[in-house]
Each structure stands twice: as C-alpha cells, then as structure tokens.
Image (cartoon, rainbow, N blue to C red):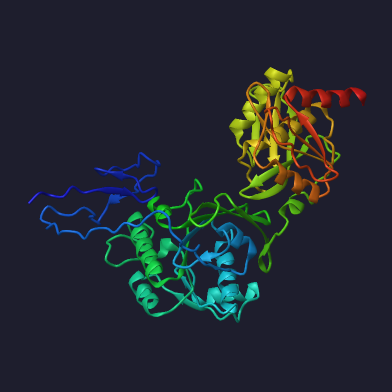
Amino acid sequence: MAKSTPRYLCAACGASFAKWSGRCEACGEWNSIAEDPVELRPGPAAKATPGRAVGFVPLAGSAAPPPRIRTGIAELDRVLGGGLVAASAVLVGGDPGIGKSTLLLQVAAAMAEAGQEVLYISGEESIDQIRLRAARLGVPAAPLRLAAAVNLRDIAAALETTPAALVVIDSIQTMWLDSIDSAPGTVTQVRAASFELIRLAKSRGFALVLVGHVTKEGALAGPRVVEHMVDAVLYFEGDRGHQFRILRGVKNRFGATDEIGVFEMTDRGLAEVANPSALFLAERRGNIAGSAVFAGLEGTRPVLLEVQALLAPNPGGAPRRSVIGWDGGRLSMLLAVLETRCGLRLGASDVYLNVAGGLRVGEPAADLAVAAALVSAVTDQPTSPGMVYFGEVGLSGEVRQVAQAEARLKEAAKLGFDAACLPRRVARGARALAAPSGLRLDEIGHLSDLVARFAAKAGAA
C-alpha cells in the first residue's frame, strides 16, 4: 500500500508546505506550521463508484430573486443589498473592540423583536456577559435565544432541531470539532467548522452570520477558503479612538460590492448615520489653506469628505511623506506631477495628508481634491468654501473623467455647495451633465489650470 504524503499548514495564513519548517515563508510567522490531520485525498485502496448523471437546464428561466429578511438596521441592509437572504452565510471581520459583537447583538435583538426566531451562540463570552451588553444597549428583554458553547457537534445537534431565521456564531475561531486533532482557531478547525455550519444553513434554510478575527495585517484570520465558501464578506473598519465605524462589503453574491454603511459609536451602542457627508463635514472650517472637499463615491453612495494637506519646511535630510486615509504611492505620484508638469517646488518640504473622518479613500477620483489641497497649502490660499472637487490626474497632468459625476453633484447640491471643479468633457458627442439647479460647474483640462487659479488669487492678495 502506498504511503500517504503528509501535508503541513500554517495556522496564521493557511499556506501549505510539503515539509515542516520553523518559519512560514508566506507570512513570516514563527512556529505556526503543523501537520494537517485531515486527509482530503482518497486513499489508493478507495473503490471508485459510478456517479449519477448531472441534469442540465436551459440558461433562460423564471427564477424569482431571493427574498430578503430585514435586519431592522438600515445601514446594514444597504451593505447586504437589501437585507439578509435565507440559507446564506455572511462573514463579518474587524479589529478587536471595533464593535462587531455590539452590532450583531443589536441586529439579533431587532430581528427578534420583529417576530423572527434568532439564535445567538457565543464561544467567547458567557451568558451573563451577553446580558450585561444587552442591558447597556437597551435591549435586555429582546426575545432572542442565547447559548454559550464551543463544541460544534453539540451546536449542530441543536440547530438540526431548532427552527431559526438567523443564527449568529461569535466567533468562528472559537468553534471546536472533536473529530479533528488540533486546537480551536487553527486553519483546519476553522475550515471544518465553517463548512459544517454553512452546510447546516443551506439545508435548514436559516441565515448564518459568522464573526471572524483579523490578523495584525488587517486580513481575516484563518484559511482564505472560508471567504470563498460564504456568500458575503463584510469588514468593520474604524479607529477605536474615533466615534465613526464603517461597515464595508468586499464580497456579496446578492448585492453590490464596496457598499458601505456608516455608524457612530455611542454609550448606547452603534447608531446609524443616515447622512454621513454632513457628519464628515460637521467640523470643517472653509477659510483654512490646505483643505478641499472631495465628492467621492463608496459603492453606490456618494459621500463628501474633507481632504487636508499641510506642508512644513524640512531643514535637511529626506523629506517626510505622511498619509492617513489615502494611498501613499499615489500621493508621491501626484507630488511628482505637480513638480514636473506645473512647476511647483515641493521636494524640500514635509508633506502631511489626512482624510478627515476616518474613512479610507481608494478611488482615483480623489486626485483633483488632493491636488487642490496641496496647491492651496503651497500658495497659502484657501479653496472656495462652496466648491467640491473630483477627477483623476494622469502622469502628464491631464484631468480625466470619473464615473457617476451626476450622483456626486447631486450630493454636493444637497449639502449646500454652489460650485464643483471637475474634468473637462473632451469626447465628441459627450452628453452634457445634468447639474442641479444653482450648482456652477468649473471644468478644467490640466492640473496647471488649477495651479494658475491659486497663483492668481495669491497675486491679487
């Protein structure tokens, strides 16, 4: 009989190796590699059995969209694409203490009070600890059912016989399957526990929400295959020292990805923020040089954010580039374009850039707003307090078009802005933008046009 080859897995990142070593070559962790006790390949003596033919159906069909289960929290429903879907699995990850358990307890209580059967299973807290949190959140009498357990075999037996619309597992890293000879939280345990719970959700028809830990790099802990198995992956972002929390959907089989929900952490739990633009701009002062308002887009939601730039003289040595909420590489590119194409001298200054409010911006449309903040800081001339900026900047300094400009303009007009600086339309036959009434459009084609306007203001002053 042929001898099976052992396989070794990293408990930190899930990388597979043919032999053991003290350090994982994929993630760099020490003493994290152990032999995988689960043998997924059939043995040489396994007898092949004939399979049944798979039935095929035509592509055209009349399947109705999956019904949605409202969670009672509109911001979460937005990220999910309209609510939870029966027999679906959702993975929620985030830093420790960011508010994952708080949000899910609020969701469980809201759905239970709406008449849904909800089961909340915790492997990290006792029943008394959950009740204390419920009292702090103001939902001590919500008719949801609690359990504190980590043995997956016992949990599965209960879920097989208990009807439920929603099951919350907090967290998947604490679940333990006694048939696997490894500790809870290891790659093998997380993979097997996730598979078993998702199988139960599909067969029993309840919506499953799994809470997942994250690594120090910010990625979800455990094997990446778990993210492929679930239907939706949500990340809870934010700084624990800041009151804002961002729930971002990075995968969703039943809705749009990159959708965000905005919450504010209060002493009564997480409160929804229906108009995040007004909240992000609440403390803005429009008469300060180095500040510009960016009309951004997160998923399908337009959001206005304040971009702040500060330049400080550097007496010697390498200039510092510090960025919060934006891509540092893109800032370096934009500084190079301003120096090479527009004649600004920025190489001898320390540059600090911040996106106020704690939201991280990833779209290239923020280039023009960042450039406006930098030029405003260099010339010591504030931007117009009633103007928003959006547009992508190329390496030659040209300002390029971005998607969904009309949605950005409508959000700006709703918050009282009266002007927008945006890319010039150069394509033949391009449809004119339907700008809201009272909003003036200031179109520019090159970054040097923006620099010239600030220089003219500085000369006039």
**x, y percentage for residue 76?**
60, 61
Relative height, residue 134 to residue 362 (above, below): below
Residue at the right extreme of this rendering: 461
**Residue sitting at x 40%, y 53%:** 59
Would you identify the image quadrant in which residue 332 lies? top right
User: Foreground: 393 or 40?
Assistant: 393
Q: Which residue lies most toward the left here?
A: 1
Q: Can residue 377 be seen at all in this image of the molecule?
A: no
Specify whether 276 is left or right of 35.
Answer: right
Q: Is residue 132 left or right of residue 168?
A: right
Q: Answer with left or right where residue 284 lies relative to residue 357.
A: right
Residue 444: x percent and y percent?
Answer: 76, 28
Q: Where, by quadrant of the figure, is residue 341 drawn?
A: top right
| Residue 113 visible in the displayed image | yes
Quarter of the figure that contains the C terminus: top right
Residue at point 16%, 50% (across, down): 4
Depicted 267 relative to depicted 188: above or below: below
- Out of 358 and 428, give the one closest to the viewer: 428
